[in-house]
Image (cartoon, rainbow, N blue to C red):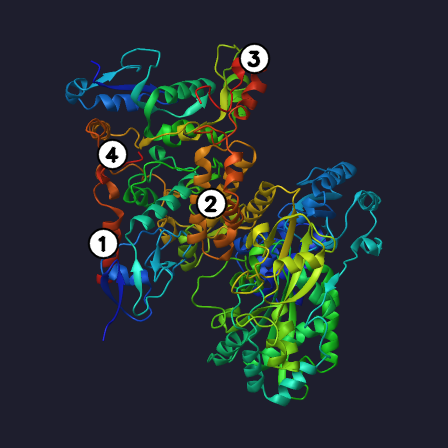
Amino acid sequence: MTKTITIDGKTIPFEEGQTIMEAAAAAGVYIPHLCHHPEYAPHGSCKLCSVTVNGRSCTACTFPALEGQEILNDTKELNDSRRRITQMLFVEGNHLCPGCEKSGNCQLQAVGYYLNMLDNHFLHFFQPRELDASHPDVLVDRNRCIFCTLCVRASHRDGKDVFAISGRGINKRLIFNSESGLLKDTDLDVNDQAAHICPTGAILIKRTGFTVPIGERLFDDKTIAETSLDYERGDHDG
Amino acid sequence: MKQFIQDLAEKHNNQEKQLLQILREIQACYHYIPEQAIEQLSGLLPIPRTRIIGVVEFYSFLHLSPRGQYELLISDCLTDHMRGKKKLTAYLAEKLDVAVGAVRKDGLVSLDNTSCTGMCDQGPAGMVNGYALTRLDRARIDRIADLINRREPLAAWPADLFYVDDSIAKPGLLLKQPIVQGAALRSAFKRGLKATLAEIDQSGLRGRGGAGFKTAMKWAFCAGEAQSERYVVCNADEGEPGTFKDRVLLNSFAHQVFEGMTLCAAIVGARQGFLYLRGEYLHLYEYLQEILHQRRQAGLLGTNILREELDFDIDIHLGAGAYICGEESALIESLEGKAGIPRNRPPYPVTHGYLGKPTVVNNVETFFAASAIAVNGADWFAQVGTEKSAGTKILSISGDCARPGIYEYAFGTTIQTVLNDCGATDVLGVQIGGPSGTFISSQEFDRKLAFEDLATGGSVIIFNESRNIFDIVHNFTHFFAHESCGFCTPCRVGTSLLKKQVDKIYEGHGSAGDVAALEELGQLIRVYSHCGLGQTAANPVLTTLERYPELYQNKLKKISYEPGFDLDGALDIARRLAQRDDAAAHLSQVGDHD
Amino acid sequence: MTDKVKVATVSLAGCFGCHMSLLDIDERIVQLAGRVEFIRSPLTDIKRCTDCDIGLIEGGVCNSENVHTLREFRKHCRILVAVGACAINGGLPNYRNYVPLEECLGESYLDGIGVENPHIPNDPELPLLLDKVYPVHEVVKIDYFLPGCPPAADVFWKFLTDSLEGRDPSLPYELIHYD
C-alpha cells in the first residue's frame, strides 16, 4: 500500500526517504523556498518552506515525509510569516531591483511577488557589502547574497570549493578560496555550475545582462510556483 | 612560525577535526591567526583555506587581525553589569589607554567585551589571554594595569587575581554525598550493565541541561544502534548567562563526572569520549587533564578498565567563545573542528552524532548524577523530587541576594524557598533558566522547580526592586543578537531586528505601534527559527511583555509614529562638514503634527 | 467639486518617473478627473498641501527638506501611499548609501577631478543631507505601498479605482514588480 501524507487536506503519496518538499513537488504542490534546490542536499536555512506538521513548524526541505502527517502549507498564517521572512532578507542585504541584471529572473524577487510582498516592512540595515568584479567572466555582488549556500554546495560538487560562508550572525559574508581573497584568483570557471546557481543577483555572468526584454523574463508571466514545479517535472523526466 | 605550525599540526595528527583546537593554540601564541598560518594549515590538513577562515570568523576568541599580547575581555553578563561592570571597564580602558574593542597602539594590550564568563557569583569578571579574572574592582584593575604596563608574564601574576571560588552554599542529595572513585563503575559491573541501565531508567533521571530528555532512554537508543563506533560527549559548554554550576562540578567533582561518562561508555559501548569545555573555563583545563591522568593510572580509564575488558578514554576539547555550541548538534560540529552551526534534525545525534556515529551528549550534571545513581540505586534518587521530576537540581544563583553560589534542591521546591535561602529581599522578579528561560514576577514565587513547571538548566538571576526591566531585556536581547550563529533567516536577521526594536523603545523612541511590532517579531523568531537559540531569543521580550504590559506602554510616546532612526543624528556628518549649527540644520525626532 | 476625492502627490528623492507613469494612464485621466481633484502636486504646481484623502509619495528621504515635506504630507493626508522603489527602499538614490557621506561630499566639492574653489556648500538655505537615503516608512507611518520602478500606469489605476470604489486596494500578481 502506498504511504500518504496530507497537505492542506489533499492526500499525497510519498516514497520512503522522501522529504516533505520532494513528495509535495512530485504531486505538483508548490512550497515556497529559496535555499532548496532539487539537485543538492537540503540546507534548511532560509525557512521559507516552513510548514506546519501535526501542529509543529518544520522545514519541508529537510523534514522526512512520514505516514499520516497532516501538513499545512498554503495558509494565510504561513504565507504572512513567509512574507515577513522574505522582507527580512530584503532589509538585511541591499536589494535594489531596478539596477540589478537579475531582475525578472530573480527567485528572491519572485518569491516576494508570489507572497504579495509590497514593501520591506522592517528597518533597513544598510550594511554596504563588498563587490568583486575581478574575475573576467563572473561578478559577485555581496549586497545581494542571502546565504542560501547553493554556490558553496555547487562549487564543492564542482570539486573546487571556490565559495564559503564565513562569519557569524548578522556579520556573515561570502568568501572566496584564493590567497588574495579575490574571485579572479580562484579556480572558478564561467561554466561551473556554481557560477549559475545563485537564486538572486549575487553571482552574475558578465556580458549577459539585460538581454531578455522586460515582459519576456522568467517571472514576468509565470509565477515562481509554476517555474519551480516545471523544473522539478523536467528534472524527473530527464 | 613555520616549524611551530608544523609541529602543532603533527601533534594533532594533521586531522581536520582538530582544526579548532589547533587554531586555539595559534591564537594563544600569536594573539591572532596569521595569514601565513592559514596557508600552511590548508596544505597540511589539507583543507580549503576558506574552511579555516570560516572557523576563525565564527568563534569570538579567534581573530584574523592581531590582538594585544595581553588580550583582556570583560564579561558583559547582566550580573556583571549589576556589579558595576560598565564603570569598571571605563576605568580599565582609561588606566591602560585603550578603547573598548581596540588594540593599544603599541600592540601590548587589547580590550573588549565578551559574553557571560560563568563567574556570576564573583563578578565583575573578565579574562586575560583566556584565563579567568574574578571580583574585579578598582584596586584589582590598578594591579592588572600595572602588571601589563610592566609586561609581567602571565605566569608571574599573583594567583589571587585568578582565584575562582566554588561557593557551594547549599549542598543536597548529590553534593553532600560524592562517590568514592571507581565506585560507580564497580557497582555497575557487579550489578550488570543492563541492570544498571534499568536502574538509571527507574531513577527517573532526565537531562540536566534543561530539556529533560530521559537519560536512560537516550543511552538505550545509542546502545541499540547497529553502528559499532559510538561516542560519549559531556557538554560542559555552559554559556547560558547566569549559570556556573558545571564549573563547580568540574572543579570539585571531576572524578564523578568522568566516571559518569565512563559508565555511559560501558553501557552504550563507546571507546572514545569528549569533554567539551567552554573556552571561558581554560583555567580548568590542566587540572582536568591531571584528573584524567590519575584515572588512567588508577585503571579507571584507558584500556581494560577495572579488568572488565572495557576500553574507553576521554579527550578534552576547548570551545572558543560561542554560546551556540551548547546546543548539542552545534557542539558536535565544533568537536569536528567546524563552525558551531546546529544541524538539521532528524537525524538526531544519538543515531548520527560525532563523525556521523551514534553519540550520547549529556550535561555535566547528568553524568554527575548518573554515577551517584549507579552507586546508590534508583530509589535513593527517586525518593526526592516530584513524580515527573525525580531527584535534585543544582542551581547557580546570582544577582541581588546576600549569598550567591551553588544550591542543590529537590525538584518541587518553590522559588520562594530558594529566595529565602540565598538571602534575597525586595525581589522584583527572577530570571529562571537564563535569558533563554522565563522571567517570573513576584506574583509567581510559589511556582516550583520542576520539568512540569519551571524547567531550567539551573541559572537563577535575582533582581530586586531597584532594577529596571528594560535594562534586563536590553542586555539579553543584545546577547542573543551577538550569539546567533546566523544560519537561518529568522534568527540571523530577526535577533538583530529585535535588538533595534528594543533599543528604540529602551532609548525612549517607541510609539504606540512599536510594542505590537515587537511582539509580532518575537513570535516570528520563536516559531520559525532553526534551533533553540532562535526559538528562545525573544523570551526576554515576550515573557516581560506578558507580565508588565503597562510598563511597556508607559515607555512609549503618546504619538502614533516615531521614526525608525535618529533623524537629527543622521544630519551629524553633513552639519560637521558644512560647519553649520543653525536651526535649519537640525531635525526634531517627532514632527509638530503629533 | 466637494464630493471629489482629493489627491495630492509629491516627489522627494526621486526622478519623477512615477509621476510620468501616473500620466501613462492616458485617456483614463479624463475619467479620473471627474472623480478626483488633484491638489498639491507637481502636476498642478500647487505648492502647499491642504487636507486631502490620498497622498502619493514618490522618492526616498535624502535630506532635511524631504523630512519636512514628508511630515507635512503625513499631517494632511488621510491615506499616505509610498509609490515606487525609491519611496519603498531608497531605490536608486540608495546607491549612495554604499559610500560614506563624507566621501560623497568630498568627491563632489573638495577633491574630485575638476573641482575649483573647493568647499562644502554651507548656505543656510540649503537642506542638509542625511547620512543615508531612507525609505519613507522609516520616517512616517505609511498606509499602502505601490512597488515598481516605476509602478505601471495600471498599478495607479487599480489602486485609485479600488480606493474610489471603497474597496481595499489589492494588486494582482502581474502588477507587482520591484523594477
User: Looking at this view, is C179 or B291 the one in front?
Assistant: B291
Instruction: Please tell me if label 1 and label 3 are on a single chain.
Output: no
Viewed as shown, does residue C170 lie left or right of B473?
left
Q: Earlier in the sequence, mark 2 or mark 3?
A: 2
According to the picture, the residue beneath numbered tag 2 turns out to be B493
User: Any mark on residue B582, and which?
Assistant: 3
Query: How far apart in space, not on screen, are marks 4 and 1 (Cα)?
Result: 33 Å
- Percent from the top left, x then y, of residue B165? 77, 59
Task: Specify few, some or many for label 2: CA neighbours under 10 Å numbering under 14, 14-19, or 20 or more.
Answer: many
User: Looking at this view, is C42 or B434 the one in front?
Assistant: B434
Mark 2 or 4: in front is 4
Query: How far apart in space, not on screen, are marks 2 and 1 (Cα)?
Result: 31 Å
Residue located at (55% from left, 17% from top): C110
Query: How far apart in space, not on screen, are marks 3 and 4 (Cα)?
Result: 45 Å
Snapshot quadrant of residue B104 = top right
Q: Amino acid at mark 4?
A: Asp
Q: Secondary structure at mark 2?
A: helix
> Do the CB atoms of the residues marked 4 and 1 lie less than 8 Å apart?
no
According to the picture, the residue beneath numbered tag 4 turns out to be C168
Q: Secondary structure at mark 3?
A: loop
According to the picture, the residue beneath numbered tag 1 turns out to be A230
Task: Specify few, some or many for label 3: CA neighbours under 10 Å numbering under 14, 14-19, or 20 or more.
Answer: few
Q: Amino acid at mark 3?
A: Asp
Q: Secondary structure at mark 1?
A: helix
